[in-house]
C-alpha cells in the first residue's frame, strides 16, 4: 500500500533522496531516538520522540499529533473551545481535538551533540486528506520565499541574537510551583553588566560559551561571533547569511539548543526580551536582510554602478518595511513583554524611521561598503519571536513596497526626535494594525491573521486580568 507521503506527493525529489539516506545515518550515528517536531504559532517546538525502528513508518505515513497543539497560547492553554460546536473552527479535523499528520522533512536531519544517540527532525503539518495545514508558520515563510523566487529573487538574512545566560539556583519543582505557567526558576548572574565587549569580563564566562560554540559547530550553524552584551548576564550570538528560510531554521534550532545545553550544565538561557532581574537590559533580535538576483547572484539592494546607497529595488523594499511596520509588529514582537523594550535613546527603536548606519533607527541601512554586503538591518524584533513569522512579515512587507514602487522618506539623524509614527506600546495596541492590514492578509491569508489574533488576544486577556506586583505596591497601602 502506498504511504501517505507518496500518495499525496508531499516531498520534493531532494527530500525523497535525503530520506533514502536516513537508514545509513541511523546506523552510523548509533541513533536510538529521533525527536520529530514542528514549530507552533509561537515558535515553540512540539512533537514526539520516536524510537529508531519507528522512523521508517513515520517517513512513509507521517505521524499523528493532537490538533489542539495548534490552538494554544504561551501558557500552553487551549484557548479555542474545541469541544463546542460552531466555536469558530473552520475545519472539522480540528473539532474535538482530532489528529492531524506531521510529515518529516528529511532535509532537516541533525544529530544532537548533547544527547548521544538522538537525532532531530522538523516536520510539516497536513490534514488527513493530504491538504496542507494552512497556518503552519514554516509553510507561510516558504510561501513568501517562493513568491520572491517567482520574481527571480532570493531572500538572504543574517541574525544578531541577544539573550540572558544565568546560573540555575533553584528550578522550582515543588508541587506548588506547578501551573499554567509554572513558577520561573531562581537564577544568579554569570557576569555583572555595563562592561560591554570587555575581554576580561568575557573570559569569565568563556568556558560556558565555548560549550555553546562547539555545539553550534557540530550542528552546522553559521556562528560568526560571540559577544559580551551591555547588561548583566547578557550575551549576543551572531550568525552568518543564509538563503530562504535558513535563518529561521537556524534560530529555532539555536534557541532550543541553547536552553537545553545550558540546563544540562546547570545554567539557564532565556530569550525573554526584558526579564524581571535587577538592572536587566532588554534583548533584541536584529535581522539583517537583502535580496539577491537568482540568475546572476548579484545583490539586488546594491547600486548597479557601485555607488553607495540602496538600489531602486532596495529603496522600494525599504519603503515597504516602513509602510507596513505597524502591521508586522505582532509578528516581530509577539509577546506582551517585548513592548517594554521600546525606549528612547536605548539602542532600541521607539518610532518607525530609517537611518544610514544609525543604531537608534528601526531600520538601519548599511550601504556604504562592499556591494555584496549592502543590506537593511531591522532592529525592531525580539528574540522570542517565531522566526518563520518574523521572516515572512519582512518578505511580505518588502514585496508590497516593490509592487507599489514605493519610496521611503528621507533618512533620519536623530531617530528619537524625528516626528515619525511611534511604534505601538503594547501587544494589545499592535494587534488591530495586523488585523486591518490588507497586505498581511494577502501575504499570510485571512485565516492565519484571524487565528493568530485570536490566540494573542487570549494571552492579552489573561494579562489584563492578572494583579501585578506593580499594582500591589502602588495601591495596597495607599488606599
Image (cartoon, rainbow, N blue to C red):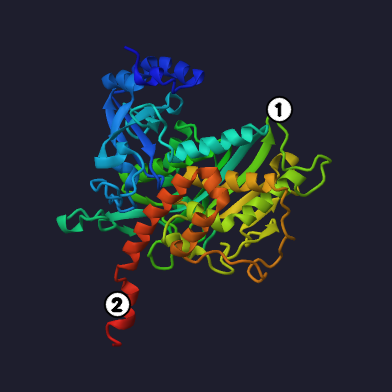
Q: Nearer the viewer, residue 60 or 97?
A: 97
Q: Position of residue 252 (x, y in %)?
A: 44, 41
Which of the 4 quarters of the picture holds residue 427?
bottom left
Quick check: can you spot residue 144? yes
Nearest to N terminus: mark 2 or mark 1: 1
Can you identify the residue that label 1 sits on? 295
Dot 1 crowding, Cα within 10 Å, few <14, some 14–19, many 20+: few
Which of the 4 quarters of the picture holds residue 47?
top left
Where 335 sits versus 20, above or below? below
Left or right: 338 as drawn, with respect to 461:
right
Distance, label 2 to label 1, CA atoms, is 61 Å
Which secondary structure lies at badge 2?
Answer: helix
Count of numbered badges drawn on the protein: 2
Left or right: 329 as drawn, with respect to 100:
right
Q: Nearer the viewer, residue 272 or 441?
A: 441
Which circle, 2 or 1, is nearer the viewer?
Answer: 1
Quadrant location of the N terminus? top left
Q: Position of residue 270 (x, y in %)?
A: 39, 52
Where 188 sits versus 344, above or below? above
Can you identify the residue that label 2 sits on? 472
Q: Check whether the beta carbons of the residues at disc 2 and disc 1 lie within 8 A of each other.
A: no
Q: Position of residue 107 (x, y in %)?
A: 46, 25
Q: Residue at x 62, y 44 (%)?
A: 289
Q: Nearer the viewer, residue 468 or 184?
A: 468
Q: Position of residue 343 (x, y in %)?
A: 54, 68
Q: Residue at x 75, y 42 (%)?
A: 302
Amino acid at each position: 500500500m502506498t504511504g501517505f507521503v507518496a500518495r499525496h506527493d508531499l516531498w520534493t525529489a531532494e527530500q525523497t533522496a535525503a530520506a533514502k539516506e536516513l537508514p545509513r545515518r541511523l546506523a552510523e550515528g548509533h541513533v536510538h531516538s529521533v525527536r520529530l517536531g514542528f514549530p507552533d504559532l509561537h515558535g515553540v517546538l512540539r512533537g514526539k520522540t520516536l524510537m529508531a525502528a519507528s522512523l521508517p513508518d513515520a517517513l512513509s505515513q507521517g505521524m499523528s499529533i493532537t490538533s489542539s497543539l495548534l490552538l494554544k497560547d504561551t501558557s500552553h492553554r487551549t484557548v479555542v473551545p474545541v469541544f463546542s460546536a460552531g466555536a469558530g473552527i473552520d475545519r472539522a479535523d480540528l473539532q474535538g481535538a482530532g489528529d492531524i499528520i506531521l510529515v518529516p522533512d528529511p532535509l532537516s536531519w541533525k544529530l544532537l551533540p548533547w544527547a548521544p544517540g538522538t537525532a532531530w527532525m522538523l516536520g510539516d503539518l497536513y490534514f488527513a486528506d493530504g491538504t496542507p495545514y494552512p497556518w503552519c508558520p514554516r509553510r507561510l515563510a516558504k510561501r513568501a520565499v517562493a513568491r520572491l523566487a517567482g520574481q527571480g529573487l532570493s531572500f538572504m538574512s543574517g541574525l544578531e541574537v541577544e539573550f540572558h545566560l544565568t546560573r540555575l539556583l533553584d528550578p522550582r519543582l515543588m508541587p506548588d510551583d506547578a501551573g499554567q505557567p509554572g513558577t520561573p526558576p531562581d537564577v544568579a548572574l554569570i557576569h555583572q553588566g555595563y562592561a560591554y565587549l570587555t575581554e576580561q569580563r568575557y573570559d569569565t564566562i568563556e568556558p560556558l560559551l565555548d560549550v555553546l560554540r562547539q555545539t553550534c559547530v557540530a550542528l552546522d550553524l553559521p556562528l560568526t561571533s560571540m559577544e559580551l552584551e551591555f547588561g548583566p548576564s547578557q550575551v549576543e550570538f551572531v550568525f552568518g547569511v543564509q538563503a530562504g528560510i535558513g535563518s529561521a531554521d537556524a534560530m529555532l534550532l539555536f534557541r532550543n539548543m541553547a536552553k537545553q545545553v545550558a540546563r544540562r550544565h546547570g545554567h539557564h538561557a532565556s530569550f525573554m526580551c526584558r526579564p524581571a532581574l535587577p538592572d536587566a537590559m532588554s534583548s533584541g533580535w536584529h535581522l539583517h536582510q537583502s535580496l539577491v538576483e537568482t540568475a546572476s547572484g548579484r545583490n539586488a539592494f546594491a547600486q548597479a554602478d557601485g555607488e553607495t546607497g540602496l538600489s531602486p529595488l532596495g529603496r522600494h523594499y525599504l519603503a515597504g518595511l516602513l509602510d507596513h511596520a505597524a502591521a508586522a509588529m505582532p509578528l516581530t514582537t509577539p509577546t506582551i513583554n517585548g513592548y517594554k523594550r521600546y525606549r528612547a535613546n536605548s539602542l532600541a527603536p521607539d518610532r518607525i524611521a530609517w537611518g544610514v548606519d544609525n543604531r537608534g533607527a528601526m531600520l538601519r541601512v548599511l550601504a556604504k561598503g562592499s556591494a555584496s554586503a549592502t543590506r537593511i538591518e531591522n532592529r525592531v524584533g525580539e528574540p522570542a519571536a517565531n522566526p518563520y513569522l518574523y521572516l515572512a512579515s519582512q518578505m511580505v512587507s518588502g514585496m508590497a513596497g516593490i509592487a507599489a514602487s514605493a519610496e521611503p522618506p528621507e533618512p533620519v539623524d536623530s531617530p528619537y526626535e524625528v516626528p515619525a509614527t511611534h511604534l505601538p506600546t503594547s501587544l494589545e495596541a499592535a494587534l488591530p494594525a495586523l488585523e486591518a492590514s490588507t497586505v498581511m492578509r494577502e501575504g499570510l491569508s485571512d485565516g492565519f491573521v484571524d487565528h493568530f489574533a485570536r490566540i494573542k488576544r487570549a494571552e492579552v486577556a489573561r494579562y489584563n486580568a492578572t494583579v501585578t506586583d506593580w499594582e500591589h505596591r502602588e495601591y495596597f497601602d495607599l488606599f
